[in-house]
Each structure stands twice: as structure tokens, then as C-alpha cells.
Image: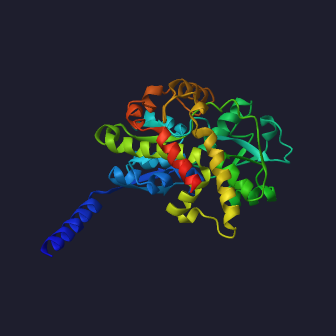
Amino acid sequence: MKHLRFAAALAASLAATGAQAETTLRVAFCARTVSAAAAPFAIATKMGWFTQAGFRVELVPFPGSTDCVKSVATRDVDYALPSIEPLAIIRPQGVKAKNYYTAYQGNVYGIAVPADSAVKRFEDLKGKRVGVISMSSAGVIVARALAANHGMDPDRDISIVVAGEAAQTAALLRSGEVDALSQFDTQYALVENAGVKMRSLDNSEIAKFPSNGFIAFEDTLKNKRGEAVALAQGYAKGTVFALTNPAAAVRALWEVFPQTKATGKDEATALKDDVKVLEARARNWRLEAGGVTKWGENSEANYAAYLEFLLKWGVLKQKVEVGDIVTNELIGDINKFDPAEITDLARKQAAN
């Protein structure tokens, strides 16, 4: 009996020690609404991959990528998942942070209009109101650059207004208060789920430019390398799982982030709608979207082309070197897992 009591006490002590050892990583998520785009985080949490590394992840929603980058700059969070433009803008101010894992290899942003809109070309946007999710969203930066690239003055020829997200955006489109959107793939899927069919303009000129990735201060990547690697590796595994089994990924999302499950819909409809949102993002999760071979790999050529584009159209006021904002130093360690094992695990979830 004494041995049993000792074993129970020891187990309790070890459990308490483990609980104390697990830390919370606050990761800035660059949209007010946590959607199916967060599925890789949910899967990594559900599968225990973050716990195995000794931490749990808390997603902290921000209105947009600019606020996400600021949250890292002020050290409110150690990690964020923003688009690259705000980092390139703030880097010359001495913010020594880098993108160490590209999550979205293709550009998730672009201009879209309602399917029945009279706007057919970028030039038709002259005098129109372009809706963004917030004024700190990278959608503002992209809209201004694309307007300039098509011969317009972004300060005079278009009006950029806040249209919010999902159902709120759809309502403004229906009422005619907003003519076009400069948002991103998952938001367009959410707007369609809210009843407004969308049509993208020809965004091919920016399609190959990378979008969001994990950023952190250089000293964080140096002093907390193992933690940074484990965060990105868990996300990478979650990405592979979600690409293989979108429905199971959505169910994991609902379990870990219950607020993401829609109310007022039957479960089959909610699942179908959220799979649609996830698949909108999946196109840019894929390695081929950036022409890379490793998860999270930063294509320096693609980043260089985007920086030149941003500089040309006045988004950047001075040249920024690729090596100042991205690093592939952690990619080898991040990819020390077998994607085939994750694929098999996801397929077994489908079988169950």
C-alpha cells in the first residue's frame, strides 16, 4: 500500500512538474476572426505536437498584418504570422525581425468584385470604393500598389474603406456601399458563404509573390531556436494533414477553437462551408505555389521580385534587401519529419 501511495504521489508530482514546464506561446494571428486558415494550429494542438515540444499555442487575433508586425516589434508577442509588406516597411526603422517560415507560398491577396459587377478591369476601379478588413490590413498596401501599377493615383482615384469581415463585408457589397474588395482568399470564401458570389480580377501579376509567414526577432530565433523550430514544424505537419483531409482538419478546428463553428447552420452545411474556406487557402499552402521543395522554405527570388514591385510603386520608400527580412537557417530543422507519416495519419482519420 505504501508503494502504491508513493507511486501515486510521484505521478502527481511529475504531472504537476510537466504542467509547470509547459509554457504558452502567444502567436499573433492577423485577422479578427479565427477561420479555417487556422486549421494547422488546431491540428498540431489536437495531435499534441506542440505539447510534445513543451508549450501550448495561444492565437492572438489582430485586425491585420500591420498590427501583427507591431505586436512583435513591441515584444507583446514573440511570434506572428503576417504578410511580408509591413515587415519590409518597418525593417529600416531598426526592427530586426525576420520571416523564418513562409506559410503561404503564393499571394493570398488580390482585388475581387461581386460576380455581377460592371468592373471588369483594374482601370474600372477608378472612382470606386475598395473595402479592406481594416486599415492595418496588408490589403491596403496591395490595393495601393495595384492601383499605381495600373496607372491610377491611389490617393485620388480609389477610396479605401473598412468593410470588416465575412457577413459584414457581404452586407456592404449588397447595399452598394463598397464596390470591390482588397482582402484575401479565405475572406472571399467567407463572403461567398454569406451569400455574395465573388469574381477575382486578373491578379496574376502578384500571384507568385509570397504572402504570410512566421516572423520573430533575430535574437528570438537565436536564443529560442528550438522553440521557433517546433512552432513552425507543428504548423507544417498541420498543413500536410489539412491538405490531405480537409474535413478532418475542419473538425479539429471546431474542437480546438469552438467559436469557429457556425451557429444557425446544420452540421453538414457548416462543414461544407468551412471546407470551402480551407480549400481557398490550401492553394497557397502548397509548395508548388512558390516553386519550393521544403515546407516553409523562403524563395529568395520570389521575395526579391516582390520587394522590387513594392519599391517601384512607392509602398517601400527605400530598397530593402531580401536577407534583411527572410532567413532559411531554420528550414532544415523544421523539415526533420516525415510528411508521408502525416499523410497516412490524415487518411486514417478519413477512414474513421
- Residue occupying image coordinates x 48% and y 39%: 339
Q: Eyeballing the image, is 207 above or below 228?
A: above
On the picture, is 137 further left or further right than 27?
Answer: right
**Residue at image point 76% right, 38% down:** 201
**Does residue 219 appear in this view?**
yes
The answer to whether 70 appears left or right of 219 in the picture is right
Residue 210 in the image, given as x and y percentages of width and height:
57, 34
Q: Is residue 164 visible?
A: no
x, y percentage for residue 298? 49, 31
**Quick one: 295 or 321, which is closer to the camera?**
295
Nearer-the-camera pick, 350 or 169? 350
- Most extreme residue toward the left, as rendered? 2
Q: In the picture, which quadrant includes the C terminus?
A: bottom right
Residue 317 versus residue 7: which sits nearer the camera?
A: 7
Q: Image quarter for residue 267?
A: bottom right
- In the rendered image of this protein, does residue 197 appear above or below residue 97? below
Which residue: 34% across, 45% down? Answer: 227
* Image quadrant where residue 15 sits: bottom left
Residue 224 x, y percent position in the rendering: 31, 43
